Amino acid sequence: MMFNSLTFICFFAVILVPLFLPNFKIRRIWLLFVSVLFYSFWNPSYVLLLFYCILVTYCSGLLIGKFQGSTIKQKLFLTLGIILELIVLFVFKYQNMMIEFLNSVLIHIKITINHRSSLILPIGISFYTFQTIGYMIDVYRGKIKASKNIIEYALFVSFFPQLVAGPIERSENLIGQIKDLEKIEAWNLPRIRQGLYTMLWGFFMKVVIADRAALIADTVFKNYRILGSVELLIGILCFSVQIYCDFGGYSAIAIGAAKIMGIDLMENFNTPYFAGSIKDFWNRWHISLSTWFRDYLYIPLGGNRKGKIKKYRNIMIIFLLSGLWHGAEWSFVFWGGLHGLYLILEDMTSSARERLIKKLKINDSCFSWKLLQALIVFALTAFAWIFFRAGNLSEAVEYICRLFSAHDPWILFDGGIYTFGVPAIEYSLFFVSLLVLITVDSLYLKTGKKLDALLQDQNMWFRWAVVLILLCGCIFFNCSANGVSAHQFIYFQF
């Protein structure tokens, strides 16, 4: 069941009815039931896998909490819980990649492993696996007490808005809210309005912007061997917009849906393409994953406390693992490593760049300088997206070689840009929707308020005008875009 479907809208409307009934005392049980039901729409058999992860980490948390005074026993049960979780992730996600790697090594001694797994990757497994590992580590560190209520803990893991694609929630944030779920005021109209605005903007990002961009990007990446530099550049730009609006749209829908039910999820995106540095970009992009790696891996490895060499080593480890988290392909690992390299070079050259800015008397607080920084960061991240989007590493290299060799600037002026399968109207619609995105993100950057908060501050006529425009856009494009909106969310595959 995709968020961008009528089925989900009907499902969500139905499950809200009991939550808004007076004296409804079983909200946690009801939400757990509908969350499991929601997950079963993808593949009912994988509900058992979800239950396995819940039970393993629930029991591990209890055992870690029970032996609070024994560090050795705590470490034993924490390690055991993490291993049992990662085994599942390895079997379903990385088994074939590891077999291919072993074959590439063993071929030199004429040995080949012929086994290849045909298991379907469970939706959201990377997200709820990391969320449960974070929970066990939090219990071990004493940040929270182990949850003794299996219903509360199961809902923490399976809460349906963020189950399949995040945000990767922290236990101290979500479990505490679940404990108080029965006390939440059901008919809190400002909260409900805020949630609806957030959901609507998420649908607009997905259905109107991301799926317009996807039509162009998919066409380019499918036919990159016969296209020129201009089309390939357009493909990169469109995919950069697609992945932001696709994943940002999912996060907005998840956050808005949870808000309506009285639960606050963490923000996952903060105008990432306005970032002034690669470090700033990762403070704004997929925030729940970035902070997860920082809190549970980078800092335990030593962070930046043990000298530059180990700091750079830790950065590269984090980003290589981040790439591997995204997919069982070397192109994802390369993408992560490239971002790690960006960060290391950025840190190594920071002093020299500051001296150069002072020497040239550049005003680094003015708009033009910030715009230049944002354009440079966007160019670097867009280049890295090639490795993320390409089917494999060799295709990414081919794409880049052709990008810098197959020059064809004339197609911008002779109409040739419309001859590779994308209707001219789609370019116009994409451009208009992109202007809407830039406007909303610019307002957020300037005011610190997302669209839902901005609308709350406006007069009713203006709120309704914006809501109707967004709603009509979603309905129109969902019905008239040649099946474009049938795209599932990109991050469902992770």
Image (spheres, rainbow, N blue to C red):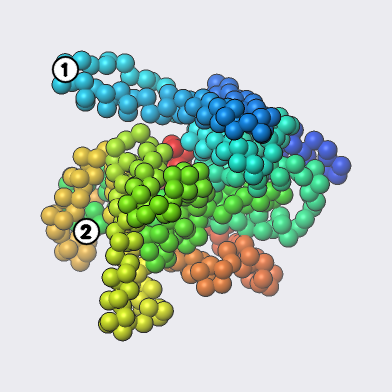
- Does residue 362 lie above or below 121 as drawn? below
- Does residue 343 lie above or below 93 as drawn? below
Q: Taking the image as drawn, is residue 256 in sight?
A: yes
Who is closer to the viewer here, 181 or 201?
Answer: 181
Q: Residues within 10 Å of mark 2 (few under 14, many from 20)?
A: some
Estimate the x, y position of residue 175 in percent, counting from the top left. Answer: 68, 42
Estimate the x, y position of residue 47 in percent, counting from the top left. Answer: 58, 25
Read off the residue under disc 1: 109
State yes or no: discs 2 and 1 in contact (Cβ < 8 Å).
no
Quarter of the view holding residue 119: top left
Q: Residue at x 30, y 23 (%)?
A: 99
Quadrant in the picture for the N terminus: top right
Which mark lies nearer to you, 2 or 1? Answer: 1
Asked which secondary structure carries label 2, the reply is helix
- Does residue 48 lie above or below 144 as drawn? above
Residue sitting at the far bottom: 361
- Does residue 186 lie above or below 274 as drawn? above
Quadrant in the picture for the C terminus: top left
Q: Is residue 160 left or right of residue 234?
A: right
Q: Residue at x 52, y 29 (%)?
A: 79
Q: Residue at x 38, y 47 (%)?
A: 314
Q: Residue at x 70, y 35 (%)?
A: 147
Q: Taking the image as drawn, is residue 239 in sight?
A: no
| Amino acid type indicated by mark 1 | Ile
Residues under labels 2 and 1: Cα distance?
46 Å
Q: Residues within 10 Å of mark 1 (few under 14, many from 20)?
A: few
Read off the residue under disc 2: 230
Estimate the x, y position of residue 164 in percent, counting from the top left. Answer: 53, 38
Q: Is residue 327 left or right of residue 21?
A: left
